[in-house]
């Protein structure tokens, strides 16, 4: 059973301190929602854990099953079992979706999947997320609509089967149907009970499909309140005002 | 004859069959300022001993002829007159020219393969090739350069009325090769010309593809990819001379450079003369600089002498690999060096997709792949 432990994490961007000591533990079988206003540092947390070069860690630790992820390269973290679904997935010109996915699956599993098996997994994965098979030959995220990009992220989640998934606003920009399709994908991923999810969102909408066990309120680079699913309803009703004032 | 009588533009100063019309370059000339003359092994100053060898063989499908002809054959030099010293040197020194003819309305089933194999760098070799595609014929030609050589040549592509010629030229030389080459295409009325240049090997390669039009409706597409390693000088100098109305040209060259003193030069000259109304042209060069110590010089020149163009533009970019691309791939577990290869192959591969013959496309991709694995 896997555990992601974030301890006193401090992160700066361009010499500006953004995260000011974040503590959070995500265990297998748990889903944690992080909610917070724009600019509070939610994506910074996600990118810092994944190892984006733009972010500088100035203090703290991130442990996945006791291994300090911060000591690993970006690809080593992914192979260790971490996955980040990005708020703004990157377009990679000239690299086809199928080539990309096959390379990623090969890297994460440590061996190339049998071609036939992979084709089947890919087809099933795409079907389940209502992704047109033609996307396999398109370039990664190039010209995809916002919703298509998000579905493509969840397709990767399902193919790569990480231990811990960080989903950064996977729900934003989705219409109701797409939201349902994407949520079902996340729920399939959670179903084994052996994986943990850290779900970053602005809205309670997705939490109706993907029920969190814990809700954390993020403001000005810190977790300022924690609770169960009921906290999300309170945020929905009252907004973040109370927290942004408190931290100002 | 032809070209040398045209009104002169600043980009295309002169052409002549006479070696004495070109002085020995010093390196200060606009035409030669990027080329390391000391590495030309005497190709430019007449000091080279003509004892080298490049074995040239043509493999032609049924219906296509290939002949070796003497210097005085009427088909030689018909479409092109040399425009620089090395080209003139080659023109005056080759012994026999290869003339490939695709007869009127013929559509050969297979590509015409011309293999050029260098036999060492002791002494230089000169060559001349003419590919003549007669009216309404359609052909594909592969020029495949391998081995070691110090070689200068002129290649004339004569594309007849309504004819189509697709050329893939692979400069896959050994590390010590020196190659200076002119590829001139002359397009008759409604002719279509597709050129795809792949330059990977050689110590110094200077390839100058040029296009002229003798009738309206000509359409030229010139693409190229190059991969420059440490110490290599790979130079491509394009000249499209629009002198008749309503013709098209599209130029897209892309390269990746890595290692100390890897040097790429791309010159894209396009002239739209007074009489060339309705011209539609675009030229683009993009360079990926993979390491410190590599340098790309990229100089597009668009000289427009008429007010009536359908479209004219150019762009040139040189930059590093995008960190965001690499991060995205690595965040999915793909190791850094493999992620780099995927992005570079993607960058060059997008252009390779333009090669319409599948087996040639595969062959070019395999060459690029092998280069990336090095
Ligand atoms: N390159 C940078 N230079 C300076 N500040 C930056 C830079 N990149 C991000 N920031 C700042 O870091 C802060 C946190 O940004 P982050 O993207 O983590 O917020 P967020 O909570 O994800 O917001 P949103 O809800 O809009 O996605 C913001 O104030 C942002 O302006
Ligand atoms: Mg964000």
Image (tube, rainbow, N blue to C red):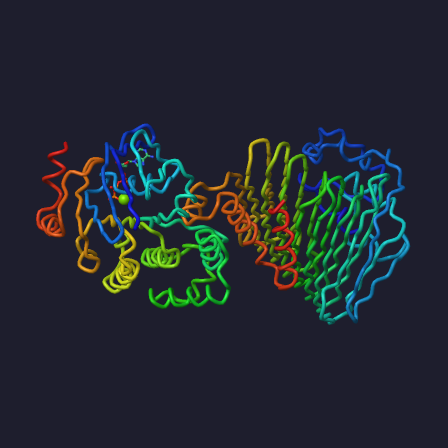
Residue visible at 72% across and 55% down? Answer: B186
Q: Is residue B13 above or below residue A113?
A: above
Above or below, B45 against B15 in this view is: above
For ligand 1, give the image quadrant. top left
* Along the line of sight, the residue nearer the viewer: B250 or B271: B250
Quadrant housing the C terminus of chain B? top right
The x and y percentages for residue B24 are 80, 32
Between residue B204 and residue A198, name the one nearer to us: A198
Left/right of residue A161 with respect to residue B341 in the rendered view: left
Position in image of residue B330 (x %, y %): 44, 46
Q: Is residue A231 left or right of residue B4?
A: left
Q: On the picture, is B246 further left or further right than B331? A: right
Choose top left, top right, bottom left or bottom right for residue A61: top left
Q: Nearer the viewer, residue A188 or A193?
A: A193
Q: Residue B91, how many percent across, how many down? A: 84, 46
> How many discs mark residues in the rendered view?
0
Residue at 58% of width from left, 43% of height from top?
Answer: B256
Where is residue B249 shown, x and y percent of the image?
A: 61, 54
């Amino acid at each position: 059973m896997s555990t992601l432990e974030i301890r006193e994490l401090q992160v700066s961007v361009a010499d500006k301190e953004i995260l000011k000591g974040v503590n959070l533990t995500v265990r297998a079988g748990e889903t944690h929602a992080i909610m917070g206003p724009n600019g509070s540092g939610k994506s910074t947390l996600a990118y810092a854990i994944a190892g984006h070069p733009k972010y500088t860690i100035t203090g703290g630790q991130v442990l996945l099953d006791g291994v300090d992820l911060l000591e690993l390269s970006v690809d080593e973290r992914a192979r260790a079992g971490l996955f980040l679904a990005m708020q703004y997935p990157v377009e990679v010109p000239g690299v086809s979706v199928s080539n990309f996915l096959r390379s990623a699956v090969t890297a994460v599993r440590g061996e190339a999947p049998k071609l036939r098996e992979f084709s089947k997994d890919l087809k099933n994965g795409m079907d389940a997320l209502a992704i047109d098979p033609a996307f396999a030959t398109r370039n990664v995220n190039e010209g995809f609509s916002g919703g298509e990009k998000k579905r493509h992220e969840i397709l990767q989640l399902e193919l790569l089967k990480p231990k811990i998934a960080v989903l950064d606003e996977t729900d934003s920009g989705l219409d109701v149907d797409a939201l349902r399709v994407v949520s079902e994908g996340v729920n399939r991923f959670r179903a084994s009970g052996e994986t943990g999810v850290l779900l970053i969102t602005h809205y309670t909408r997705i939490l109706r499909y993907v029920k969190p066990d814990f809700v954390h309120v993020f403001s000005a680079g810190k977790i300022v309140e924690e609770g169960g699913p009921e906290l999300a309803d309170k945020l929905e009703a009252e907004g973040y005002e109370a927290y942004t004032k408190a931290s100002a | 004859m032809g070209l040398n009588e045209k009104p002169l533009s600043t980009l295309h100063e002169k052409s002549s069959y006479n070696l004495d019309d070109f002085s020995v370059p010093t390196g200060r000339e606009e035409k030669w300022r990027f080329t390391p003359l000391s590495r030309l092994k005497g190709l430019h100053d007449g000091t080279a001993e003509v004892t080298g060898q490049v074995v040239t063989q043509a493999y032609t499908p049924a219906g296509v002829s290939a002949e070796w002809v003497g210097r005085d054959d009427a088909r030689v030099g018909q479409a092109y007159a040399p425009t620089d010293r090395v080209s003139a040197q080659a023109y005056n020194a080759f012994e026999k020219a290869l003339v490939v003819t695709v007869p009127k309305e013929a559509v050969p089933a297979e590509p015409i393969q011309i293999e050029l194999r260098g036999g060492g760098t002791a002494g230089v070799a000169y060559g001349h090739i003419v590919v003549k595609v007669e009216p309404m014929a359609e052909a594909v030609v592969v020029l495949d350069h391998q081995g070691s050589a110090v070689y200068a040549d002129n290649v004339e592509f004569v594309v007849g009325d309504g004819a189509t010629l697709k050329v893939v030229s692979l400069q896959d030389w050994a590390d010590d090769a020196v190659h200076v080459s002119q590829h001139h295409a002359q397009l008759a009325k409604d002719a279509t010309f597709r050129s795809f240049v792949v330059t990977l090997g050689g110590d110094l390669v200077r390839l100058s593809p040029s296009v002229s039009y003798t009738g309206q409706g000509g359409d030229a597409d010139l693409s190229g990819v190059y991969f420059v390693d440490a110490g290599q000088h790979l130079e491509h100098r394009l000249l499209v001379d629009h002198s008749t109305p309503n013709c098209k040209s599209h130029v897209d060259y892309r390269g990746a450079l890595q290692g100390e003193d890897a040097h790429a030069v791309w010159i894209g000259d396009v002239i739209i003369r007074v009489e060339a109304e309705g011209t539609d042209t675009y030229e683009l060069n993009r360079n990926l600089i993979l390491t410190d110590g590599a340098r790309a010089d990229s100089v597009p020149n668009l000289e427009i002498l008429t007010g009536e163009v359908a479209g004219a533009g150019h762009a040139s970019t040189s930059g590093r690999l995008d960190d965001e691309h690499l991060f995205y791939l690595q965040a999915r577990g793909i190791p850094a060096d493999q992620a780099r290869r995927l992005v570079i192959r993607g960058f060059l591969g997008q252009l390779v997709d333009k090669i319409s013959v599948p087996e040639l496309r595969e062959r070019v991709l395999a060459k690029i792949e092998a280069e990336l694995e090095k």
